Amino acid sequence: MELIPSLIAKANPKCKKFMLVTDSNIHKLYGDMITKGFADLGLTMKILVFEPGENNKTMENADKVLIALFENRFNRSDVIIGFGGGLITDFTGFVASIFKRYKKSQIWTYF
């Protein structure tokens, strides 16, 4: 897990900003480690945490991610990371596809 920030940064060398979308269970387990990893590399990362469960895959939550992307001046060279299971990665992929046809990385929790 400690290698994830450096692997994502190497795969996206021009990127300086990252947005991590995850659920509260994953964030409790790995949030601090991922945040520290990106900070150690001198990279900016915004984290959005949602409650787990299918009922949270909503347009209202997608809107929250889109607003955060606009407010933090993300562009197409920046990366959205879906960190979790299929629900989070599907949701993140959807948001990435409607925000400037974005790049996206996925981190699955069922290694």
Image (cartoon, rainbow, N blue to C red):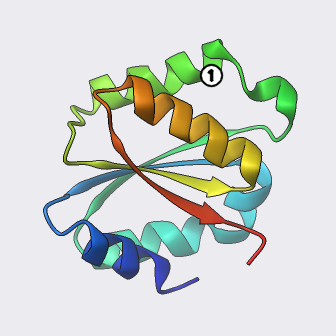
- Quadrant where the N terminus lies? bottom right
Above or below, 2 relative to 58: below
The picture places residue 22, in percent across and down from the top left corner, at: 64, 49
Question: Neighbour class for label 1 at 10 Å: few (<14), some, many (≥20)?
Answer: some
**Amino acid found under the numbered disc labelled 1:** Asn
Which quadrant does the C terminus fall into? Answer: bottom right
Numbered disc total: 1
- Between 107 and 39, the one lying in front of the other is 107
Residue 90 percent across, percent down from the top left:
65, 41
- What is the x, y in percent for residue 36? 44, 73
Residue drawn at 40 percent across, 20 percent down: 67
Q: As drawn, is 78 to the left or to the right of 19?
A: left
Task: Find the residue positioned furthest to the left.
Answer: 14
Q: In this figure, which residue is indicated by the disc labeled 1?
A: 61
In-image side of 11 versus 73 (left or right): right
Residue drawn 38% across the image and 79% down it? 7
Q: Is residue 32 left or right of residue 12?
A: right
- Circle 1 sits in a helix, a strand or a loop, which is it? helix
Above or below for 79 versus 41: above
Residue at x 29%, y 72% (from the top left corner):
11
Q: Position of residue 30 (x, y in %)?
A: 65, 70
- Above or below: residue 74 compared with residue 100: below
- Which residue is painted at 29% across and 24% down in the image? 70
For the residue pair 65 and 110, the one nearer the viewer reads as 110
